[in-house]
Image (cartoon, rainbow, N blue to C red):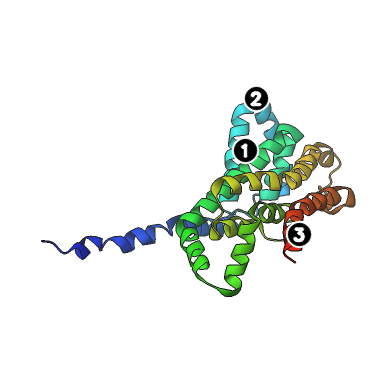
């Protein structure tokens, strides 16, 4: 009879394969940061605006599909130019359906990172956090207790970098449907603002100016977003109050 332990030798290769998606994301992200930062810029959009408009008018569906595909790649591989891509969506397609294209593509790209992290490290790391004690387990339990609220807040108030916000849910074991829903609706308010700015780029170009990227911090814009964040925070506060 053969030794059953002999049939388990190939496992290390299978284990290494789990890290391949994250490794690819990291390599492409580094290469993109070095090679694309001068191309995915506002100036590039300004210099090519007439050609883009002409191509869109002649090939609307192809333009929409190409734009969404490019935006997905930018987010999935954390390439520079996400803000410019959002402006471009508004510039080419208007506030609607531009905001749907922008938020949908960003969500798909973010989901790709989430799945790569979950496949490579997430499940194992979540299990280790469950088994550990102390502060690590408390953080995980806190997120688990109010997952939806925490995820919405993380998206609505971008104090955490977008790439990091894509990884944390995978590492604490958030389910895919909840991640997708909170990502789409969480980034929608901010995406709406920047798509709106992009929709007005025609006038900005005509005046030789640059868009106001700080508009999201103006009181009439920031106030409603913070209000949404407060609503998302309310269930957490109420639970803490009841436990006190």
Q: Answer whether residue 68 is visible to the viewer in this image.
A: yes
Quarter-of-image position of residue 180: top right
Quarter that holds the C terminus? bottom right
Disc on the earlier residue, 1 or 2: 2
* Residue occupying the point 59% across, 64% down: 140
Q: Number of callouts in the render? A: 3
Q: Contact, CB < 8 Å: mark 1 with mark 2?
A: no
Quarter that holds the N terminus? bottom left
Task: Give the residue number, with chain letter if any, for mark 2.
Answer: 58
Relative to the observer, which residue lies in front, 63 or 107?
107
Give residue 191's position: percent from left, percent from top: 73, 45
Question: How far apart, in angstroms, are the residues tagged by discs 3 and 2?
Answer: 53 Å
Question: Which dot, 3 or 1, sits closer to the camera?
Answer: 3
Side (left or right) of 200 relative to 1: right
Disc on the earlier residue, 3 or 2: 2
Question: How far apart, in angstroms, are the residues tagged by discs 3 and 1?
Answer: 41 Å
The secondary structure type at the circle numbered 3 is helix
* Residue occupying the point 72% across, 64% down: 243
Task: Give the residue number, with chain letter if any, for mark 3.
Answer: 237
Question: How far apart, in angstroms, are the residues tagged by discs 1 and 2?
Answer: 15 Å
Near mark 3 (Cα within 10 A), the count class, few <14, some 14-19 or many ≥20, is: few
Task: Give the residue number, with chain letter if any, for mark 1.
Answer: 67
Side (left or right) of 51 relative to 73: right
* Residue occupying the point 46% across, 58% down: 120
Give residue 232's position: percent from left, percent from top: 74, 52
């Amino acid at each position: 009879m053969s030794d059953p332990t002999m049939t388990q030798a190939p496992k290390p290769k299978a284990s290494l394969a789990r890290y391949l998606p994250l490794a690819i994301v990291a390599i492409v992200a580094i290469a993109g940061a070095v090679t694309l930062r001068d191309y995915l810029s506002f100036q590039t959009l300004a210099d090519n605006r007439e050609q883009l408009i002409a191509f869109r008018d002649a090939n609307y569906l192809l333009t929409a599909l190409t734009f969404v595909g490019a935006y997905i790649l930018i987010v999935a591989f954390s390439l520079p130019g996400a803000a410019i891509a959002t402006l471009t969506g508004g510039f080419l397609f208007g506030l609607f359906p531009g905001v749907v294209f922008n938020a949908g593509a960003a969500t798909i790209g973010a989901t790709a990172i989430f799945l790569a992290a979950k496949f490579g490290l997430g499940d194992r790391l979540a299990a280790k956090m469950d088994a550990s004690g102390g502060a690590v387990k408390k953080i995980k339990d806190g997120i688990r207790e109010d997952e939806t609220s925490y995820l919405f807040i993380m998206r609505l108030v971008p104090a955490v970098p977008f790439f990091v916000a894509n990884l944390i849910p995978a590492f604490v074991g958030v389910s895919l449907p909840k991640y997708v829903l909170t990502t789409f609706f969480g980034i929608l308010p901010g995406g709406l603002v920047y798509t709106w700015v992009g929709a007005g780029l025609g006038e900005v170009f005509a005046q030789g100016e640059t868009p106001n990227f700080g508009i999201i911090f103006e009181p009439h814009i920031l106030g409603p977003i913070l209000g949404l964040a407060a609503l998302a925070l309310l269930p957490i506060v109420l639970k803490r109050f009841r436990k006190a």
